[in-house]
Image (cartoon, helix red, strand yellow):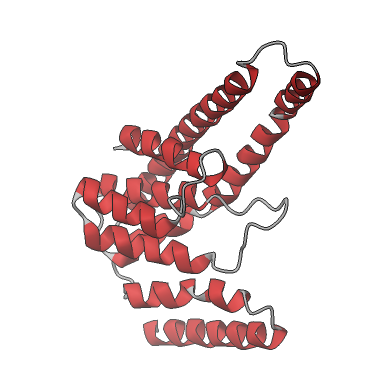
Amino acid sequence: MVRPGRFFFALFSLFRSSLSIGLLERPLVIGLFWSLFYHDSATSLHIAIFFELFWLDLIPVGTFIPPHLTAATFAALALTTFFGFDDPARIMVILFASMPLAWIGTRIEGLLREREKDSYNQLLNWARNPLSPNLPTVLVLRSLLRSFLAAGVSFFIAVMILRYIIGGLLELYPGVFASMDVTWAYLWIAATLGGLMALRVKRAYVILGTGIGLFILFMLSSRF
């Protein structure tokens, strides 16, 4: 399950910057693709909608590198399919565990961009003295191959680590997550935090924080 996920993740990662083809790197497209490939449309699209909502406020403008939504989405889909989960309470654990990969992927992408400075200098020298007509093609293909390999290897390592961590938690506490009364509606409401953050209004943040606090108190009081 992780091996085909690694290949497709590396491929879709190229759509972020190397091969810009519409919105193919968005979670909704990835969820639709995964549902068609593994014939699990309901769970895959539910996960995709969660990630699509959560990062609504982050727009790739200027030199800002947005969170690597592809990494978080593919990891959550691969782990959910691997464990065979369909319960939102258990999938919630995978969703939150996969979120750090969005920032780790951004860091790796930034390091790869730093490595491309040498290629940029070579291209400038070639523009002043174009001795080899194939140099731009070689630089582009080398950059694509480097990005593809780095994405595939890093994704495989990260997902394998999460697999053993989540598997260990489920063995130690098998009934904790299953006992939670969590539905996809709750998760989507939590994910709309991204849309509220996009408002950039402090009052909205205060109202949101108060609502979350009251909801947590209500859930805790209902369990005791």
Q: How far from the left and from the top, in percent, is residue 110? A: 67, 40
Residue at 39 percent across and 35 percent down: it is 6
Say if residue 177 shows up in the picture.
no
With respect to residue 196, does 78 lie above or below?
above
Q: Nearer the viewer, residue 169 or 45?
A: 45
Q: Nearer the viewer, residue 188 or 9?
A: 9
Point out the image quarter for the C terminus: bottom left
Q: How many marks?
A: 0
In the rendered view, does 27 fall on the left or right side of 63? left
List the single residue furthest toward the left. Answer: 39
Point out the image quarter for the N terminus: top left
Q: How far from the left and from the top, in percent, is residue 126? A: 75, 19
List the single residue furthest toward the top. Answer: 131
Residue at 61 percent across and 54 percent down: it is 66
Residue at 73 percent across and 28 percent down: it is 120
In the rendered view, does 35 fall on the left or right side of 77? left
In the rendered view, does 86 fall on the left or right side of 206? left
Q: How far from the left and from the top, in percent, is residue 182? A: 34, 73
Say if residue 103 shows up in the picture.
yes
Q: Quadrant of residue 11?
A: top left
Residue at 70 percent across and 53 percent down: it is 64
With respect to residue 120, does 19 lie above or below?
below
With respect to residue 205, does 110 lie above or below?
above
Q: How far from the left and from the top, in percent, is residue 167? A: 35, 45
